[in-house]
DNA sequence: AAAATCTTCCAAAACGTTTCGGATTACTTT
DNA sequence: AAAGTAATCCGAAACGTTTTGGAAGATTTT
């Protein structure tokens, strides 16, 4: 049988109220009673019933995270890093994390609504923001706390952490241009994703600044997976005049592109330059190692989580908008100067 | 304001009881009343308060997953695949998933105790079983439902899914031996992990069956990360007479080993053979692509989850013990015959 | 016409906790 | 000795739901 307050009350001869107040360290309970109650509670192995507590206190000490997926899975290392960052910070701050996956659309909407109305979580971490992001409007209308990794199209006001993707892609293009590349292709993410916008913008600005011609046939959209990168890069490489460099908008697609190049007998880092974005742990160990932009995903997860919890607790936010500068990690895949 | 049963009762002129029963489709409510209640509930945007429901019903429709970590993170793609499998199956069956990470020891124990006593979840999925696994005894003593991915040392009786690692490693050794390798090294996992035991056993049995000498100096323990694989493989490669093949016990270490070899100017798949275990999505796209053992992690996650939920619901289990045969995926990293 | 059976409804209790608003006792102060 | 103040304690209400055990009325059976 599970021990409840009543049992402790009986064992100590005190009332339920007093036991409760003793355990919560109220100061209208004598030191004596407190220590008695504590001792007995420990002896009996008491742990509070979470639901009763939550029903009463009206908050859950739980944050929610609904990962948007297109296929059924989210095995993207990008998410695992982020998830780890969020989860561990949450644990440190005494919060649980409720995780699920939904594909954007009716299902996702319903999941948010249910969680909000059922007060299942105290707030949400939003990841991979989209241009017209209905999640944001749902949460804002319900006046429900959330913090996001990523910005939104319209200048909606909510706390976020984001990296300056535009800046990052400019760095990459500048790097490639400085190596002598003139036909630089881009593997872009699906355009409804907010970061697709920023990265593509950076890519284009980078070309302009390097006095290079933008060629739309060299911008292909991939689904962020290795397979997608492979397929789109194959198309690029089979063009009559293929690019000499491919800037992928995430590492996974870059790996796919590397495979496509290697399958065509090209030596990545010599015959062709390939770059990524994210710097997932893998990229340091691939062959050749991947030139990419470092995002401290684990830390970012922690930051978003902390923001959210401050928001939930009604504490003032240290910073409401955080924009990080990604760092260019030059490795082998971009190679040396091509001339 | 959040809509509750009382509001619907008021709006319809029925009692709270009737409203509750109408919404739950009891058959002592007239069809008329039911549809009225349903309509009004929809109009008002009613969603039940989860905690009140749980407090009353005494179950949570939530499964727990505590990922054991050594460092602070769990960005291992192995876990993300598995997590995805568990989470999606759980969602399909109407369950939430509560995820956290703890490093084995006091912290982990406390997390389990709190979740059990606070009835925070209905059951646990246990991953990465250990030889003396206190989690199992805690759960069994509390008579708390759980299903595991992995077996345990003592023949404790609990439902599990596992792959036959011994068989898998034998396949690998056989494959390497058939290519002419005689000095085969092994990158083993920390020995307290249950699967370390099975994989090492398979490795040794494989050697015996191939009439090869086991050489303990060729068995090194790594921490399952790329970095660990890199470091341990470096030691092997710097031996006076280095191995010609390295069988790593997971893909991540295999990738690390590949880097170590490549950094020494060796061509993997030609100068040295390297194999992995798990077949994470990455391994198909690495260069060279990795010969490894395929485990359907996503499906395994789903299976364990389903077992657990059957257990929770008191339904008979389709199968209580599931042992899967991993499949050898021969790719480039093991190369061709070496003579 | 009385008794039995359905059908439809509901008041009240229960789940385990926290909190509100006193109540009691003991100790100080007048 | 009476009045005031602290220090402890506790009964009852509340959180929002489900379930128990019946009640009321309509219909059928005897």
Image (cartoon, coloured by chain):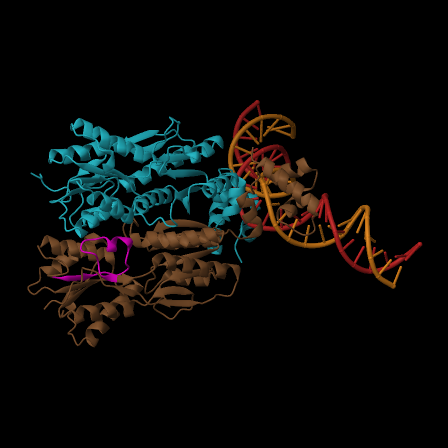
Chain colours: A cyan, B brown, C red, D orange
Q: Position of residue D27 (x, y in %)?
A: 82, 52
Number of numbered markers: 0
Q: Is residue A164 left or right of residue B308?
A: left
In this view, the residue in front, C18 or B151, is B151
Q: Is residue A254 left or right of residue B270?
A: right
Q: Is residue A74 above or below residue A206?
A: below
Q: Position of residue A78 (x, y in %)?
A: 30, 44
Q: Is residue A55 left or right of residue A299?
A: right
Q: Residue at x 12, y 45 (%)?
A: A271
In this view, the residue in front, A151 or A32, is A151
Q: Is residue A134 left or right of residue D18?
A: left
Is residue B66 visible to the viewer in this orientation of the structure? no
Image quarter hosting the C terminus of chain B? bottom left
Q: Is residue A206 above or below residue B276?
A: above
Q: Residue at x 19, y 27 (%)?
A: A208
The chief SS type of the magenta part is loop
Q: Position of residue A180 (x, y in %)?
A: 11, 35
Indicate yes or no whether the magenta region holds residue B284.
yes
**Residue A329: which quarter of the image?**
top left
**Region of the chain picked out in magenta, as a range:** B272-292
Indicate yes or no whether the magenta region holds residue A19.
no
In this view, the residue in front, A322 or A252, is A252
Is residue A101 visible to the viewer in this orientation of the structure? yes
**Residue B146: which quarter of the image?**
bottom left
Image quarter hosting the N terminus of chain B? top right
Q: Position of residue B224 (x, y in %)?
A: 24, 56
């Amino acid at each position: 049988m599970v021990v409840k307050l009543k049992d402790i009350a009986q064992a100590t001869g005190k009332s339920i109220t007093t036991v409760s107040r003793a355990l919560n360290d109220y100061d209208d309970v004598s030191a004596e009673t407190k220590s008695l109650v504590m001792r007995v509670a420990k002896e009996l192995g008491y742990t509070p019933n979470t639901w009763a507590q939550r029903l009463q206190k009206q908050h859950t000490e739980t944050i929610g995270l609904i990962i948007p997926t297109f296929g059924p899975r989210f095995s993207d290392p990008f998410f695992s890093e982020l998830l780890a960052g969020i989860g561990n910070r949450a644990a440190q701050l005494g919060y649980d994390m409720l995780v699920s996956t939904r594909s954007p659309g009716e299902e996702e909407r319903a999941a948010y609504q249910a969680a909000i109305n059922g007060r299942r979580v105290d707030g949400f971490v939003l990841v991979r923001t989209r241009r017209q992001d209905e999640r944001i409007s749902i949460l804002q209308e319900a006046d429900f706390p959330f913090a996001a990794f990523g910005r939104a199209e319209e200048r909606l006001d909510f706390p976020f952490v984001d990296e300056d993707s535009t800046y990052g892609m400019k760095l990459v293009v500048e790097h490639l241009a400085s190596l002598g590349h003139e036909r630089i292709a881009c593997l872009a993410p699906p355009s409804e994703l907010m970061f697709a916008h920023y990265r593509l913008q950076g890519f284009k600005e980078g070309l302009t600044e390097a006095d290079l011609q933008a060629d739309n046939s060299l911008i292909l959209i991939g689904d962020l997976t290795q397979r997608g990168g492979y397929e789109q890069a194959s198309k690029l490489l089979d063009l009559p005049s293929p690019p000499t460099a491919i800037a992928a908008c995430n590492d996974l697609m870059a790996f796919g592109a590397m495979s496509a190049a290697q399958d065509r007998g090209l030596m990545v880092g010599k015959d062709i330059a390939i770059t990524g974005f994210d710097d997932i742990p893998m990229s340091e160990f691939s062959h050749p190692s991947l030139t990419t932009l470092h995002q401290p995903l684990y830390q970012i997860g922690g930051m978003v989580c902390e923001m959210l919890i401050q928001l939930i607790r009604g504490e003032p936010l240290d910073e409401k908008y955080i924009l990080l500068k990604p760092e260019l990690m030059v490795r082998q895949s971009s190679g040396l100067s091509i001339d």
